[in-house]
Image (cartoon, helix red, strand yellow):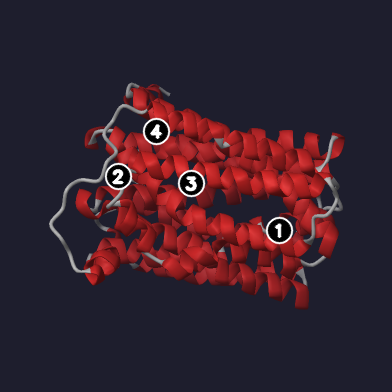
Amino acid sequence: MNTLVSQITRAFRHRDFRLLWTGAFLSFIGSWIQIVGQGFLVYQLTHSEAKLALVSFVGSLPYFVMGPLPGALVDHFNKKTLLVITQVLLGGAAIFLAAAAYYNFIQYWMIVITALVVGCVGAFEVPTRQSAVGTVVPPEDLSAAIPLNALTFNLARLLGPAVGGFVLAKIGVDACYLLNGISFLALVFAALAIRADLRATKKEPQPMKDILLGGMRYTFQERPLRTLFLLELCVSMCGIFYITQMPAIADKIFHLGPQGLANCYTAMGVGTVSSLLLVAATSERGFRAMVLRCDMSLMAVGLLALSFTHNQWTGYAILAVLGFCGVAHFNITNTMFQLLSPIALRGRVLSMHVWALSGLGPFGVMFFGWLASRTSLAMSLQVGACCMAIGAAAAWGSRRGLESV
């Protein structure tokens, strides 16, 4: 406990980090409120696992298409300006869907197109926000700040779904969208209040090819980063697709309504928050390689167990374990990508982490969504478990690739 308090104190003693953390936390509460409402709406409109997956896939397609480009641009522009612009655009998209739902003209294709627009903006917002942490926090406190920064999204996962389920049941999906749109103002105000210099550092002119491919080249040249990238790709493609299928899981496996769906997300949030607190408390202890291997193994077991259970309380426990493992993996990978990359390349190297998670991972989401619609949810979960078991075996067999982690 003392170690955890020490890590939190190290990160939160920096004013600008506190601003970023608070703004992101409030914004992510809104995001989780929308996730609950939109997932329920899409499933009610389509009753299709494949179409649930398609919304997620389309929203992540820009991450795949643009690859390291957003990270390269982040390194060359003022991060404060980019943060403000992206938050305004993301808020506007949510407000549009709120209006469409309120006036009852919302259709599935509108949700898909808006997801594409949000994905395009998010491809720039994520590396901007994450690399800003490395600017407002000195290197000696970065290993404590990164898991606490990730805690914003996952702590919001505890509160957002509960609020989202209540708002969805009592008011409607339009209110879920509206609350999310308003929540982006928190990061706008936080970005404007930051005192740190977030302008681009002056660099020697570089060929466009080097700007675009520098992060990719560095990632694959450095063995630890290459290993981390490949393991993260396995998890993002085969280990977390169940999140997009949560409305179908709640309905078909546990036979739950809107509040039960919110409880599923909240159960997963309990695991993710616990995971981040553990990672923050052990950030200096050198456990990272072991945690990566264990979490991939547990995810294989968890997906398999989820495919066989029909008891909602057992399901909540499994979702908590899956949430714990997934966030531990992505947080450690994020930390190592920042610590192992030079400052001049940090945005571009971080974009490779984002690309593995949000650019390539959705192809797995689409495949498993298609498989669930063609066979069953249980079968898709079992195939995912097998893939994760293979990835876990590779992680246990990789010694030199994880020796620096």
**Of the residues shown, which amino acid type is indicated by label 4?**
Ala
Image position, residue 390 (x, y; %): 49, 72
For residue 94, side relative to residue 140 (left or right): right
Q: Secondary structure at mark 1?
A: helix
Q: Residue at x 49, y 28 (%)?
A: 22
Q: Is residue 164 above or below residue 255?
A: above
Q: Closer to the camera, 128 or 237?
A: 128
Image position, residue 340 (x, y; %): 24, 52
Say which of marks 2 and 1 sits in front. Answer: 1
Q: Are marks 2 and 3 in contact (CB under 8 Å)?
A: no
Which residue, given by chain and number where applicable, does mark 3 sit on? 86
**Of the residues shown, which amino acid type is indicated by label 1?**
Ile
Which numbered tag is attached to residue 180?
A: none
**Of the residues shown, which amino acid type is indicated by label 3?**
Thr
Which numbered tag is attached to residue 111?
A: 1
Q: Are marks 3 and 1 in contact (CB under 8 Å)?
A: no
Q: Residue at x 55, y 71 (%)?
A: 387
